[in-house]
Image (tube, rainbow, N blue to C red):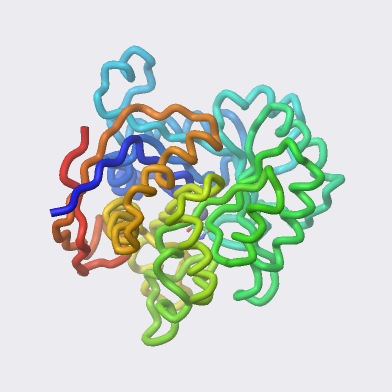
Amino acid sequence: MKECTLLMPLDMHLHLRDGVMLETVAPLTSYTFSGALIMPNLVPPLTCKADVIAYKKRIMSALGQVEDVEAELMMDDYFEPYMTLFYQNYDAKFLEDIQDEITAIKLYPAGITTNSDGGVSSFDIEQMRPTLEAMSRLNIPLCVHGESEGFVMDREAEFMSIYELLASNFPDLKIIMEHITTKAAVDMLDKHKNLYATITLHHLLITLDDVAGGMMQPHLFCKPIAKRPEDREALLHVALNAHPKVMFGSDSAPHPQDKKESCGCAAGVFSAPIALQVLCELFDKHDKLDNLQTFISDNAQNIYGICPEFKEVGLIEEDFEVPLKYGNVVPMYAGKTIKWSIESVV
Ligand code: DOR
Ligand code: ZN
C-alpha cells in the first residue's frame, strides 16, 4: 500500500467565517495543516487592527488555542492563522501600525464575490499608489481576486491587464494571483518576477462541465467559475511540476446547506476536510507524488517567508468515505469514496 508523508502543510487561501461555522470548520483544517492564510471577507470585512486581532482570537479559541507565547510553545498541535486585511486605500502610518498583525492584504473588486461590496470599484493606479508603495516598502504581499466585470467565463483573462499594470508599476510588491483558473493566468507567472499564484483543489479537478454540464451541481459552484479543459491542463501542469511560483490555496469556502441548495446558490466549494487526501490521489495518479511537498508547503514558505510550526502528516492509499455533512455544510465529494486517507498526524 502506498504512503506519503507531508511536512507542515499550508493552505494559503482559506475562509473560516465566524461563530458556529468557524467552530465547525476551523478544526477540520487545523487537524492536518500547520497554518493557513485566513480571508478577511467577513460581514463587515476586516479593515482595522482591532478587528484583525479580535478575529484571530476567535479563531484561536475555536481551536482551543490560547494566545500566549509560552503556552504556544507547549502545545504539540499548534495551528497558525496567518491573518489578512481587506484592501482599501490605507495610508503608510496605518500600515506600519498593523504590519505585525497581518501576513498579507486581500484585494477584491467591489461586488465580484461573497462579501466583497466594500472592495475596489475602479483600478485607478494613482489613487492606489500610496498604499501599494507603502506595502512594497513594508514587504506586505497583495493577494488579489482577479476578475473583471465581464462575461463570467472571460473575467479572469480580462483581469490580466490589471495584473500587468500592478506588477509593472510596483515591481517590489509581491502580488499573489489568487485561485487562478485559466491558462492566461498561468502564462502571466513567467512574465513578471513579482507575480505568484495560488491554485485550489477543485480547479485542478473540475471544469465548467462538472458544474453545469449535466444536472446543476451547487456544491461545485464557486468564483471564479471552473473553466475549460485546456485551462485545467495548464493549472495541472504547474501544480504537478511544483512550479516555484505556485502554492496550494484551497479557497475552501463553507456556506450552510440551505444557502447552496437554493435559488440563488452561494459561491464556494467546501474542500478543507478532503484537501490533502485528494491531492495525494491526484499527484499519485500523475506519478508526481514527490512534488506534492513543494506545492503544499515549501513554495509558500519561500514566497511568504514564513516558518510554520512542525507538523508531519502521514497519508496512506486506503479508502476514505467522505461524510455527507460537517455540521450543516456539505463538503466537496460528499458521500463519495476517495482513495487516500489520513493515517497519522504528529
Ligand atoms: O467561491 C467563492 N467563495 N469565491 C470567492 O471568492 C469567495 C468565496 C466565499 O467567501 O464564499
Ligand atoms: Zn476565497
Query: Where 90 sits versus 238, above or below?
Result: above
Query: Where 308 sits versus 232, above or below?
Result: above
Query: Residue most toward the right?
Result: 126
Q: Quadrant of the N terminus?
A: bottom left
**Toward which corner of the image does residue 211 lie, by quadrant?**
bottom left
Q: Name the residue: 41% across, 40% down.
A: 297
Residue 203 point in image, percent of width and height: 46, 64
Q: Quadrant of the C terminus?
A: top left
Res 51 seen here? no
Residue 331 point in image, percent of width and height: 30, 62
Residue 155 point in image, percent of width and height: 65, 69
**Left or right of residue 279: residue 46:** right
Res 145 seen here? yes
Query: Residue most toward the top?
Result: 70
Q: Name the residue: 66% across, 22% down.
A: 97
Q: Name the residue: 56% across, 53% down.
A: 178
**Left or right of residue 332: residue 48:** right
Query: Where 84 sits versus 202, above or below?
Result: above
Q: How many marks?
A: 0
Q: Nearer the viewer, residue 263 or 197?
A: 197
Q: Name the residue: 71% across, 38% down.
A: 173
Residue 120 point in image, percent of width and height: 72, 53
Query: Where 44 sits versus 230, above or below?
Result: above
Q: Nearer the viewer, residue 187 or 308?
A: 187
Query: Residue most toward the bottom?
Result: 214
**Toward which corner of the image does residue 64 lie, by quadrant?**
top left
